[in-house]
Image (spheres, helix red, strand yellow):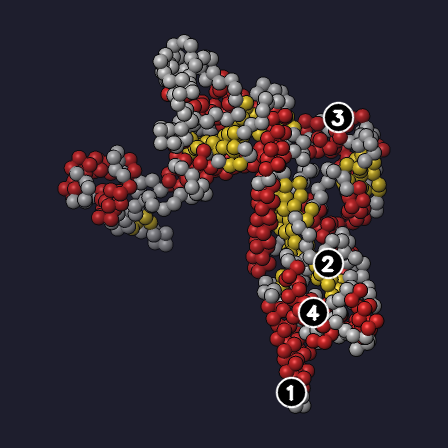
Amino acid sequence: MADPSSYRPRPGDIPDSPGVYRFRDEHRRVIYVGKAKSLRQRLANYFQDLANLHPRTRSMVTTAASVEWTVVSTEVEALQLEYSWIKEYDPRFNVKYRDDKSYPYLAVTMNEEFPRVQVMRGHKKKGVRYFGPYAHAWAIRDTVDLLLRVFPVRTCSAGVFKNAARTGRPCLLGYIGKCSAPCVGRVSAEDHRELAEDFSDFMAGRTGTYLRRLEKEMTAAAEEMEYERAARLRDDIEALKKAMEKNAVVLADATDADLIAVAEDELEAAVQIFHVRGGRVRGQRGWVTDKVEDVTTGALVEHALQQLYGEESGDAVPKEVLVPALPDPVEPVQQWLTDRRGSAVSLRIPQRGDKKALMETVARNAQQALVLHKTRRASDLTTRSRALEEIAEALDLDSAPLRIECYDISHLQGDDVVASMVVFEDGLQRKGEYRRFQIKGFEGQDDVRSMHEVITRRFRRYLAEKERTGEWAGDGDPSTDGSSGAAPDGLPGAAADGPSGGSVNTLTEDDGRPRRFAYPPQLVVVDGGRPQVAAAQRALDELGIDDIAVCGLAKRLEEVWLPGEDDPVVLPRSSEGLYLLQRVRDEAHRFAITYQRTKRAKRFRAGPLDDVPGLGETRKQALIKHFGSVRKLRSATIDQIREVPGIGRKTAETIAVALAQAAPAAPAVNTATGEIMEDVEETAPDTTAGAQGEPVPTGAPDERRGQET
């Protein structure tokens, strides 16, 4: 690992002007390319205290062995040179989008004497007009089949074309009228090229003019009583309209625009692009990238624009590009796009109307693409095995952690403090093993104390299961000091004549169901840094558990903290182990947030009847149904309350006392007149509506078992 100070240039040697810089490693390979409005200021940011650098930046500068730069005149030139060098050197620390599939395009080879319409993939060729990309090749062929009736352009390969010219006989399409057969001289090269131009104009979205021209020709043919020609033109118009219907109108005024959306997390980002021409979606494509450098959403958009338009020019760059966030600064990028198009290009964020609604659709597609990418990556057995092996190696474990438990604390400004426990076995979620906890040991916000309490309660239950089945190996009397070899707090010591671990199934109940908290993990992951890790390890030590590894995952995810270590473990950026730890942490966070929102929603809906002991949901609903409101119930006598089915005298007295002690709701006020509305009734709390937040995973057992009381 190189020391950045060993190759740091003197500040006076770096020009204070726009330019592009390259970091090289000890083998002279370019590992990072960047641009700057001021080279001096930008490079100074890299050569500061390593502790202040983002982990990805720190990894880059310690891998590099030298830095060099090239001065340019403007920021636009810097943008162009940066794109060229990224394409040339393929630096490992730059964001590089990769297509999540090889998208097919509809191509018209205008660089040939007789242009050909075909499906093409891969790199674009000079002189060829491209339309799309499309999601499926069959979608292109369906469209082309409809259009060849009106624009009978050549679609055959070079070999078929030459063979037809040699024999003087066209192919089948030539006989059925879907090819003008230039191979046998039915049309000249000029007329055939004109057909190809009309085909390209129609595909580019200039459909209205051509349809109006055909309609005029059809009307004129009918007036001249050329009914066969008029009928053929009518069928041509219908074919064109059918082809147009394949792409619904999404933007009015025949807008030409590209819409770009980004979905990202801490490690990866997915980009989706919708190509709108003539107000219709003409193509869609997407990319996925690893975030190997510390980038904002605006920077991701800038990289996407470079890849999307770096080799395009003219009409291939639309008049309008809509993005979720603007690059900083935006002016050079907008000027670069304008230069490539040859006319003004608007680069902006949609604020309202149809364009904003369509952008939300593109954003949903980007999010789905990211989720699908992660799902495919997680479902691969080889990848999961490699991830577990990398975690074991990084944390110095004896074996791969086949069962991982992750804990997260959630609260809203210190209220409704809860915790989650999620389980991954063999790299896959085990939702039936998820648990959730209420923090009971104290009031207020303290993530460290909360983590200590949750870990203590979870593994105290684990030890209780071991004790109940005779597995507890305590040698002394039961104690509560947490010393090694003693039973956990409040647990009896192991019976001398208890069954041995081999005589019973210690992990299942008598009916075959798994015991709660009976399975110990090989690795405990906590959401947080050094303080949370120390709290979790202290809890295990107090319970005498020394065979479970603990680590913490900091918010930036590259930092994995181990108990008692001053420095974190930084997993390689390409590590599948890091990716698995991220998934585990994100799932724990999601599950904790869900439970916290549920508790908050229930608290907001709480009413005075909730404090009546022994009064369940069924009888509460019966009371409200009988009286109509809590206010009327509060004014009822005990005998009137007893009229409700299922309510006895003792329960009625308890209800009356509870309602008398509870403060009535504040009276409603008419804000227009200031009048107090005495007759407004309190409505009963909605005790049947679902809680806000995400539902408990389908098919999982009752996860409230984690709410220990």
Q: CA distance from mark 1 to mark 3?
A: 83 Å
Amino acid, disc 4:
Phe
What's under tag 3, amino acid-wise? Met
Point out the image quarter for the N terminus. top right
| Residue 656 shows up from this direction | yes
Label 4's element?
helix
Q: Which residue appears at 58% of the width and 52% of the height? A: 365
Residue 250 in which image quadrant: bottom right
Q: Earlier in the sequence, mark 4 or mark 1?
A: 4
Question: What secondary structure is marked by label 3?
Answer: loop
Q: Which percent across, then down, holds residue 660?
A: 23, 37
Q: CA distance from mark 3 to mark 2?
A: 45 Å
Measure the C-alpha gap from mark 4 to mark 1: 26 Å
The answer to which of marks 3 and 2 sits earlier in the sequence is 3
Q: Residue at x 71, y 72 (%)?
A: 173
Query: Disc 1 designates what residue?
Result: 227
Q: Earlier in the sequence, mark 1 or mark 3?
A: 3
Residue at screen point 84% across, 42% down: 71
Q: Nearer the viewer, mark 3 or mark 2?
A: 2
Q: Is the residue marked by circle 2 packed among few (<14), some (14-19), or many (20+) residues within 10 Å?
A: some
Secondary structure under tag 2 reads: strand
Q: What distance separates the C-alpha of mark 4 from that of mark 3?
A: 58 Å
Asked if residue 582 lies left or right of residue 498, the reply is right
Q: Dots 4 and 2: beta carbons under 8 Å?
A: no
On the image, numbered disc 3 is attached to which residue? 1
Q: Are marks 3 and 2 in contact (CB under 8 Å)?
A: no
- Dot 2 corresponds to which residue? 120
Where is mark 4, residue-wise? Answer: 202
